[in-house]
């Protein structure tokens, strides 16, 4: 799993709120991070996250619940 810094987390949280009205929750615990939303997210949101993280050569891996992901 990849770890992103707090500046990138703040940027992602802001983008999710502005573009989709969603609150992104970040969980940072040794040895990894994971992220989740309060509700299942759409394919549009998943594609946005994938594209946004790809600029840093990162990839989100979405869980089956449709609400959470981690980064590789």
Image (spheres, helix red, strand yellow):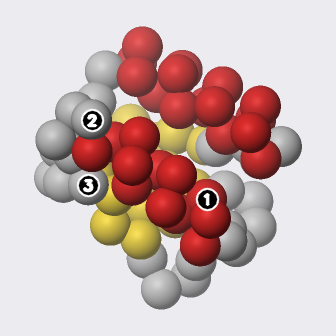
Q: Is residue 70 visible?
A: no
Asked whether disc 2 touches disc 3, contact meaning CB atoms under 8 Å apart, the reply is: no
Percent across and percent down for residue 6 are: 40, 18
Image height of 1 relative to 6, above or below: below
Q: What is the CA distance from the residue labelled 2 to the residue labelled 3?
A: 10 Å
Q: What is the CA distance from the residue labelled 1 to the residue labelled 3?
A: 14 Å
Percent across and percent down for residue 2 are: 17, 44
Mark 2 is surrounded, within 10 Å at the Cα level, by few (under 14), some (14 to 19) or many (20 or more) other residues, namely few
Q: Taking 43 as reference, is 22 left or right?
A: right
Mark 1 is surrounded, within 10 Å at the Cα level, by few (under 14), some (14 to 19) or many (20 or more) other residues, namely some
Residue for point 77% across, 31% down: 18
Task: Determine the image quadrant of residue 57.
Answer: top left
Q: Secondary structure at mark 1?
A: helix
Counting residues from the start of the chain, the first of labels 1 and 3 encountered is 1
Residue at the spot of label 2: 55
Q: Taking 67 as reference, is 22 left or right?
A: right
Residue 59: which numbered mark, if any? 3
Residue for point 59% across, 73% down: 43
Q: What is the CA distance from the residue labelled 2 to the residue labelled 1?
A: 16 Å
Percent across and percent down for residue 59 are: 26, 54
Asked whether disc 2 touches disc 1, contact meaning CB atoms under 8 Å apart, the reply is: no
Q: Taking 58 as reference, is 9 left or right?
A: right
Q: Secondary structure at mark 2?
A: loop
């Amino acid at each position: 799993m990849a770890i992103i810094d707090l500046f990138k987390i703040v940027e992602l949280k802001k983008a999710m709120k502005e573009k989709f009205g969603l609150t992104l929750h970040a969980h940072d615990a040794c040895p990894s991070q994971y992220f989740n939303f309060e509700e299942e997210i759409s394919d549009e949101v998943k594609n946005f996250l994938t594209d946004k993280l790809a600029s840093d050569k990162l990839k989100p891996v979405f869980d089956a619940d449709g609400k959470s992901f981690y980064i590789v």
